[in-house]
Image (cartoon, rainbow, N blue to C red):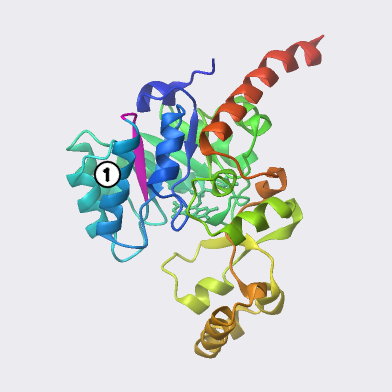
Amino acid sequence: MLRTPICDLFRVEHPIISAPMAGSSGGELAAAVSAAGGLGMIGGSGPGPEWLREQIELVRRRTDRPFGVGFITSAPDTDQLMETALELRVPVIAHAFADPSPYIRAAADLDILTIVQVQSVELAREAANAGAAAIAAQGIEAGGHTGYTSGTLPLVPAVVDEVGDIPVVAAGGVADGRGLAAVLMLGAAGAWMGTRFVASEESISDPYAKEQIISHGADDFLLTRVYDIVNDAPFPEHVGERILRNRFTAAWHGREDEVSLRKAELARELAASLEAGDTSVRRVLAGNSAGMVRDILPAGEIVRRIVEDAEAILRSRPGELLG
Ligand SMILES: Cc1cc2nc3c(=O)[nH]c(=O)nc-3n(C[C@H](O)[C@H](O)[C@H](O)COP(=O)(O)O)c2cc1C
């Protein structure tokens, strides 16, 4: 059995956290991951407090195990959503993309643990000083919004060295047992996985997105700001969005200044194409780890397979390598 400090901290069996993913991880997915012994996270940003309340209640109907809610903290409705999460005493809350300090204090007053997702060593230091219980070190290969600075492989050990006893989980590029075993060797206390769980039966991503993930490879994703610019998305400058390459990114990625100048026109064109059912400009959020994802599975099965494979690797490889 794999045991790391996050198993004790979050009272879970396995060192696997399913990432909070707006538009993808609702209560069903979080509940399935938690029921299987991981820490399931609801992507709390997007539809609003009533939806969030329903998802939290749904998890509690499915399992009595710990779970969490994660926010896009830079979004304007975070205060309101946090009120719901605090009122319902969600055991774990995660923040990303904005200063989490006030939220960490409010959660700590209620004995709620906060994970902060960071994209650099500097942000990790700030999160540690602000009182984060754990830190998710997010590399550039991560699916969805992420930073431009560092890949998961160099970021994780650098953050581990920086934050002392605070457990660090690796976010970005982990989608199977090999990845989990690898990040544990880097000093991570677990993996925080998004793309693998998008392609689960329980995720609320549309079937088109799931199909695209399982049918594309590691080369097919890019980090871009073109949709964020057009959509006026609430993310800081240091963050872009990793998505599947498509006709819109082929036309506009690299021409961000022009996109900014023409954003009203491009927003109208995009809306019209999407309305007409044109999938060639549809935005599919996922990371390069999609290259390892070949099937849509029940989330509990994903957790079980990853843990089993990581354990097998960690038992067999040292003997093979060291002779
Ligand atoms: C579809 C999708 C939606 C995401 N939404 C969020 C979000 O709402 N909040 C957040 O902090 N991170 C979000 N992320 C990023 C994840 O938290 C995580 O860092 C990433 O998925 C890890 O990389 P991986 O996709 O290679 O596993 C999202 C990722 C994906 C794929």
* Residue 131 sits in quarter: top left
Image x and y of residue 93, in percent: 32, 43
Q: Which residue is found at the position 28% from the left and 63% from the top? A: 77
Q: Between 186 and 203, which is closer to the camera in this rendering?
A: 203
Position of 116 compared to 143: left or right? left
Mark 1, Cα crowd under 10 Å, few <14 / some 14-19 / many 20+, is few
Q: Which residue is found at the position 79% from the left and 16% from the top? A: 321
Q: Is mark 1 within 8 Å of ligand 1?
A: no
Q: Name the image quarter holding the C terminus.
A: top right
Q: Between 20 and 79, which is closer to the camera in this rendering?
A: 20
Image x and y of residue 41, in percent: 40, 42
Image x and y of residue 128, in percent: 37, 38
Q: Name the image quarter holding the N terminus.
A: top right
Residue 99 is a magenta residue: no
Position of residue 312 relative to residue 206, above or below, is above
Image x and y of residue 265, in percent: 54, 90
Position of residue 137 relative to residue 206, above or below, is above
- Tag 1 residue: 57
Q: How many numbered marks does the figure carry?
A: 1
Which residue range is magenta in the image? 64-70
**Is residue 186 something one can see in this rendering?**
no
* Residue 273 sits in quarter: bottom right
Position of 45 compared to 305: left or right? left
Q: Which residue is found at the position 62% from the left and 22% from the top? A: 308
User: Which secondary structure lies at badge 1?
Assistant: helix
Residue 69 is a magenta residue: yes
Q: Which residue is found at the position 52% from the left and 84% from the top? A: 267
**Is residue 88 something one can see in this rendering?**
yes
Position of 107 compared to 226: left or right? left
Amino acid marked by disc 1:
Glu
